[in-house]
Image (tube, rainbow, N blue to C red):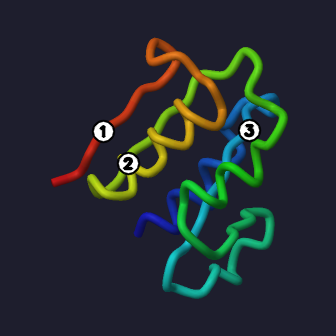
Amino acid sequence: MHRRRLGHRRHDVDPRARGAGALFRAPAPQRWPALAFARGLVHEVAAKAMAGRYENVRAYVAGPPPAVDAALRMLLLEAKLTSDNIRYDKYT
């Protein structure tokens, strides 16, 4: 269900928006070739995809607490984002 919605939602996104999607275990969906997914830990994929592009950025992070914590560390320590430019939700 979510994949179907995601495939349709890509047309509603502002073309200036950038993000990184990652799959840790599941194979990347082949039904929607316009959606690109990398494999690996989300914070590592995001760091690689966003390297050098953190100016005027607001980050949105959601997921299980360990994944969100890793992403927050990367955003604060490596990307040097300020806490007011980071929004997050830890799923429980």
Which residue occupies the extreme front position in the image?
77
Residue 40: x and y in percent read 60, 73
- Give the SS element for disc 1: strand
Pointer 2 residue = 68
- Give the SS element for disc 2: helix
The residue sitting at 68% across, 36% down in the picture is 13
The residue sitting at 81% across, 28% down in the picture is 16
Say whether marks 2 and 3 touch (CB < 8 Å).
no
Say whether marks 2 and 1 touch (CB < 8 Å).
yes
Asked if residue 75 lies left or right of residue 54, the reply is left
The quarter of the displayed image where residue 15 is located: top right
- Give the SS element for disc 3: loop
Sequence-first tag of 3 and 1: 3
Q: CA distance from mark 3 to mark 1?
A: 19 Å
Sequence-first tag of 2 and 3: 3
Q: Nearer the viewer, residue 3 or 53?
A: 53
Q: Nearer the viewer, residue 32 or 57?
A: 57
Say whether marks 3 and 1 touch (CB < 8 Å).
no
User: Count of labels shown?
Assistant: 3
Asked if residue 5 lies left or right of residue 12, the reply is left
Pointer 3 residue = 18
Residue 41, which numbered label? Answer: none
Amino acid type of the residue tagged 1 in the rendering: Asp
The residue sitting at 79% across, 72% down in the picture is 33
Asked if residue 26 lies left or right of residue 36, the reply is left
Pointer 1 residue = 89
Sequence-first tag of 2 and 1: 2
Q: Is residue 3 above or below residue 56?
A: below
The residue sitting at 72% across, 63% down in the picture is 35
